[in-house]
Image (cartoon, helix red, strand yellow):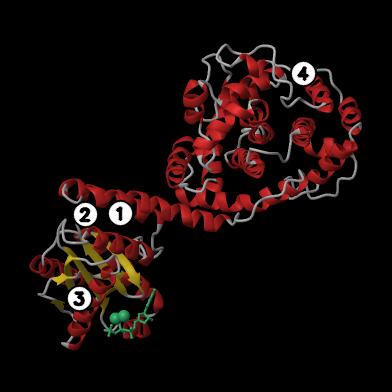
Amino acid sequence: MSIPALRPVLPASLARAENLPSIPAVAVEVLSLTQNEECTLDQLVRVIERDPALTAKLLKLSNSSLFGVGQEVSTLKRATVVLGMKTVRLMSLSFSLASSLPRAGEGFDFPGYWRRSLVAAVAGRSLALLVGSRHADEAFLCGLLSHIGQLALARCMAGEYGGVLELAAGRWPTLELEERVLGYSSADVAEVLLRDWHLPELIRVPVAYLHRPGQIPADAREDTRRVARLMAVTALVVSVLCDAEQGDAYRKLYELGERTFALDAPRMDAFLIGLEPGIRETASLLNVELPGGLDHSEIIDRARLQLVHATLGATADLRMAEIRADELFLRNKELLVRATRDKLTGLPNRAAFDEVLAREAERRLKGGPRCLGLIMLDIDRFKVFNDTHGHRAGDAVLTAVGKVLARLTRRSDLAARYGGEEFALILPATTPAQLGLVAERVRSAIEAEPIAFEGKSLRVTASFGGACLERAGSAADGARLLEAADACLYAAKNKGRNRSEISGKMLRFG
Ligand code: GH3
Ligand code: MG
Ligand code: MG
């Protein structure tokens, strides 16, 4: 079929294309019924029932956990009553479209296409429900159609689009790349195609402006803008869950989720993990085979790590610019702290600490930027304290010590809960003498800190060990710095506790 009203930017060859995906007959009828205010439930059911496969899928959907109506639905009419006319209309449109689009072929990543479309559909719908939007079904359809422009290009302009895919080198092509090579993007194609299919603005605009929400036409309706906001977040969810390198998308998703829907990082993570069963279920409903590697919690862990690596990795070039390096350290630290916090104290946990330590050691391969200081501290006779005052009192101590550390360290330092009753500090530019001062300052503050617990005021002390690394031979030398500090801590314990021992010898490796 041909596309009549092509925008001038699109080449004539696309307008003449014979094999553009066409909209299936049932979908056309459902759509025209949608536009008819008078349409009755019976009319809708009659149209859908003409396609037995579609009917079966809608029934399966009504009984799936995705819709979870809690009662067996065995007729289409019942489904229409239980799910509502709008849902049945939009879902039948979604399913009939999905069944008419190609599943496999040469020269295009069809499994990737379907995975992205499915993730977008389920994520769009779930996000809408999460934020209380009444456009969950529209978001599902938008998601399902979110990559339709790329599919159309791969089908109709295989030669030209092949060049784009080649340049993308195995990654999913971006709109920028398409524009650079073709002079227009798959989003332009999607807009034309969806217009040709007579899909309403509420679907067409969010799909066409998925990656450029800032350019939505000024006359777009408020409803449309709302769905577009949902889909902009959804597009980032797709990048995080489907792209091989998602560090940047993950950061952007957090930012946009927070800004648009006040979703904080833990809720966003829970949302991402919660999508997994729905994606699998929808895949089976739409007969789409998903590639492996869809464990969402693993993907999130990997994304976090990539985020951290991406930012920390950037520090390597800045060895000479110490101030900028310190700023980076600060930023890295803040990113990490957000990602990996110890629940009790609110401090970064051991994983975050190990990561920063390894990266900081790496920055000191062959010397520079400045001496890296590390302090370990361990609360004295904490077992006895727990046995005497109870575990909850012990927890109050850990929280209080965490607060002292947060209060007394500079923004450029990293204070972490290393494990149990042990804490660790990384001080990026500190000599042994300065390290001794810091350790003493923290030690006396802990000793002087009254810890309020159930009407009592309790006190604890801690022992400290510290060491400095001037030059590393490998990233693993961070662990050797830790060992040196730990040996000093052991000495402080042996010398009677509530004291600090700092190694006067700067460590130099490599
Ligand atoms: P030392 O002065 O030699 O360090 O003696 P210690 O008793 O502090 O050392 P030990 O390693 O024998 O005991 C550590 C105790 O810390 C044991 C454990 O019950 C307590 N502990 C570890 N993690 C937590 C926690 O999260 N909460 C509480 N309340 N106690 C904890
Ligand atoms: Mg201990
Ligand atoms: Mg102890």
x and y, in percent, of residue 423 in the image: 29, 70
In the rendered image, the vertical position of residue 391 relative to residue 438, given as above or below: below
User: What residue did someone put label 1 on?
Assistant: 333
The answer to whether 190 is drawn above or below residue 283 in the figure is above
Q: Position of residue 380 (x, y in %)?
A: 25, 81
Which circle's residue, 1 or 2, is located before the other in the chain? 1
**Residue 475 placement, left or right of 466:** right
The amino acid sitting under disc 1 is Lys
Q: Residues within 10 Å of mark 4 (few under 14, many from 20)?
A: few
Q: As shown in the figure, which amino acid type bears the numbered disc 3?
A: Phe
Q: Residue 430, how many percent across, how many down?
A: 13, 62
Q: CA distance from mark 4 to mark 2?
A: 60 Å
Q: Earlier in the sequence, mark 3 or mark 1?
A: 1
- State the mark number for residue 464: 3
Question: Residue 453 falls in which quadrant of the image?
Answer: bottom left
Question: Which mark sits nearer the N-terminus, 3 or 2?
Answer: 2
Which residue in the protein does label 2 denote? 412
Amino acid tagged 2: Ser
Instruction: Report the residue marked by disc 4.
Output: 35
Q: Position of residue 346 (x, y in %)?
A: 36, 60
Q: Is residue 461 left or right of residue 30?
A: left
Comes first in the chain, label 3 or label 4: 4
CA gap between label 3 and label 4 equals 74 Å
Of residues 344 and 252, which is closer to you in this image? 252
Amino acid type, label 4: Gln
Q: What is the spatial separation of the Cα atoms under label 3 and label 1, in whole angstroms?
A: 23 Å
State the CA–CA distance, disc 4 to disc 1. 54 Å
Identify the element where label 2 is drawn: loop
* Circle 1/circle 2 CB separation < 8 Å: yes
SS class of the residue under badge 4?
helix
Instruction: Tell me, for residue 235, which label it has, or none.
Output: none
Q: Is residue 137 above or below residue 306?
A: above
